[in-house]
Amino acid sequence: MPGLDGEVILHRDRFGIPHARATSAHDAFFAQGFVQAEDRLGQLEYDRRRAYGRWAEVVGRPGLGFDVFARRANLGGAARREYEHLDGASRAVLDAYAAGVNAWLGLGRALPTDLALAGVTPDPWQPWDCCAVFLVRHVAFAGWQKKLWRGRLAALLGPATVARLEGRGDAEVPLIVPPGGFGSPTPPDAETLEEVSAAMASLVDLAGGSNSWALAGSRTSSGHPLVAGDPHRLVEVPNVYYQCHLACPEFDAVGLAFVGVPGFPHFGHNERVAWCVTNANGDYQDLYVERLDDSLETRREQIAIRDDDPVTVECRSTSHGPVLFGDPASEFGLALRTTALARPSRGLSVLLPMLRAQTVDELDAAVRDWVDPVNNLVSADVEGHVRYRTVGEIPTRAAANAWGPVPGGTGDHDWTGYVPAAELPTVRDPDVGYLVTANQEIVGPEYPHYLGVDYSRPDRARRLFARVAPLTEATVNDMAAIHQDRRSLGADRWVERLARLDPRDEHERAALEHLQTWDRMMDASSIGAAVYLVTRDRVGKALAHHPVLASLRGPLPGEPRALFVPLELRLWSLVPGLLAADDTTFLPEGSTWDDVLAAALTDAIGLLRSTLGDDPDQWRWGALHRCAPRHPLSATHPEWAERLDPPAVEIGGEWDTVWSSAHPAGYGFGVTTSSVARYVFDLSDWERSAWVVPLGASGEPSSPHFADQQTRWAAGELLPMSYNWDGIAVAAEATTRLHPA
């Protein structure tokens, strides 16, 4: 191989996971690019094309909407600027990774099945493509979609109604800082929402959590920390995360990598430190209602479309950022300001320093330059220290920016600075001996800075707190058992209300009896779980058809369908609060909640009978709740599905259980979002650490490692996370040596 400093030894374990041992850091990152190209070449090309707005070249018209979004956001230009503004050492990491990808391409091997079917031969990988892939994976990951929804709702129903709806929720939330503390979410006030409603008035006529926890040595059987968790994302083919192991004289690290990005920015450990993240739900993206006049910077780009004529897209930019949505012929549009695009991000500069860190304090210092997304970083070291920090950039600005689109022309809502990194929430070696993060509220009202408002419901945090707090002799097996927790706290309220209903026939009577004896565990084998979730789903679907909400059922002009969150999903999180308060805002005129629940139960039983049969004992949740992810090409070419899609598996859980697995509310019960990895790091002995991912290491459907972890993942089992090099070499399924040319 040209470009190597020395020999690289690549061992593949029995699950095809690569373990690369190199003589320099450059060669380690070269090896990471090489093995990712070997295993995930189609995925690299998919993410790169999406980032540059070139996916329609492969799939035709279905890819156009997102291509327009990417071109208007100018993700490609932002990626190039980000690379150019990195320091030399950070660019060298991306250069080495790109060289490894291109070394694989230079071998001239046969294309993987997906690229062969599409007739696509990848161009050489550029170092800034790594920046582009990370941008496209996260620019649509944060808060602008929720703000757009609230803005449309406020313009439709008025600020007072939205303030009331957003104020519904659980009274107490387990805080991250201080561990063991509790707080209450802060609802918006109608006066603040008036600014949002007024701004949206110009536009209305136009019309996707994770868990992590750490235990100090005082709570474990070994006397050393344990760190565990599971990120929740869209379940994709292939999986977003990639297991691998990289070693050189500077570091020896194993973890879960983003395909297309070197290092382990989210989950991993080296010889002395382990780390993991969850989404902190920080507020770092704002939407501005802008007047579209001739003073704006404008460029035109042409998008090629497979089997169709090209389309020319007008891309405009304001002082706040790119105009993403709105009819170009209209007077107004929506511009996005986000930390990743506002200035060249230096976030990827932390990749190498993270791998070198020897203590939690060194890791804490290494991530100070992280930009987006804003994360909860949990870490532990072999000296026994555990630490938490909120990492990332959060701008300072007016209160109204938190809740929805704001006027862009006044200057009253511009960013005025950033929360100082040194003042972001942190805690080291908490007295309670544990840390729990589940996308919940981070701090209480005494904290001096605004961080965000759109936190997850507290159910997962409450269950994790209940499982972690009593532990005193915890082991890796205890951590794995917590991964599998499927107790639904949200079900309690629904079962209580449904129990009041009078059954209309013997099938409804049987369903209600199953609910009464149900343990509220969302197991795949559970009948009560199926009755609860299908009924709740029918409630949301019925409310979504309220005439007053008709204008919210589709996206704004220019908003890609792929990014639009359907109304049924938006209502999913609102309905429990409405039910608890007997709030009839979205109920049909003259109806009570008992009326709506009774109709939904009847509808649910009809669906269960037609889908699973008349025998209630066959109404198992897993029979409906199946994980059957589709390759992005099979979605547009169904004739390729048999060759590209993995086998389906039944799994338990629901949206707000620790074992999180969400379905597209109102559109079926198949799993769309779930744990895309599970891991436990044991700092007393790295060989006791464990992990698993959906599917497998390879993205090639004909590979034995395409889906060889799938059944274990569905069952909640973990695989050994091998770290000792002698053992890795002896047990290797295959070994490859790369020699410098």
Image (cartoon, rainbow, N blue to C red):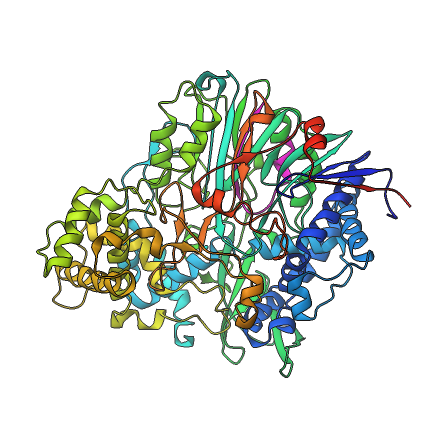
Given residues 529 and 595, the one toward you in this image is 529
Is residue 694 something that shows in the picture? yes
Whether 271 is among the magenta residues is no
Position in image of residue 398 (x %, y %):
45, 51
Furthest residue to the left?
502
Give whichever of 669, 471 is nearer the camera.
669
Q: Where 413 falls versus 431 (above or below)? A: below
**Residue drawn at the location 28% of the way across and 49% of the way down:** 167
| Residue 539 occupies quadrant | bottom left
* Residue 588 x, y percent position in the rendering: 18, 67
Residue extending furthest toward the right: 741
Which residue corresponds to the image point at 45% horizontal and 30% vertical from the top-left? 479
Residue 137 vertical placement versus 375 (above, below): below
Magenta-drawn stretch contains 380: yes
- The residue at 15%/53% (across/down) is 510
Name the spot of residue 48 as percent of width and height, x first: 66, 60
Q: Nearer the viewer, residue 415 or 89?
A: 89
Is 160 rendered above or below residue 369?
Answer: below
Q: Is residue 37 left or right of residue 293?
A: right
Left or right: 602 with respect to 108?
left
Q: Which residues are magenta?
A: 365-381
381 lies above or below 622:
above
Total residue callouts: 0
Percent across and percent down for residue 284 are: 52, 50
Q: Quadrant of residue 160?
A: bottom left
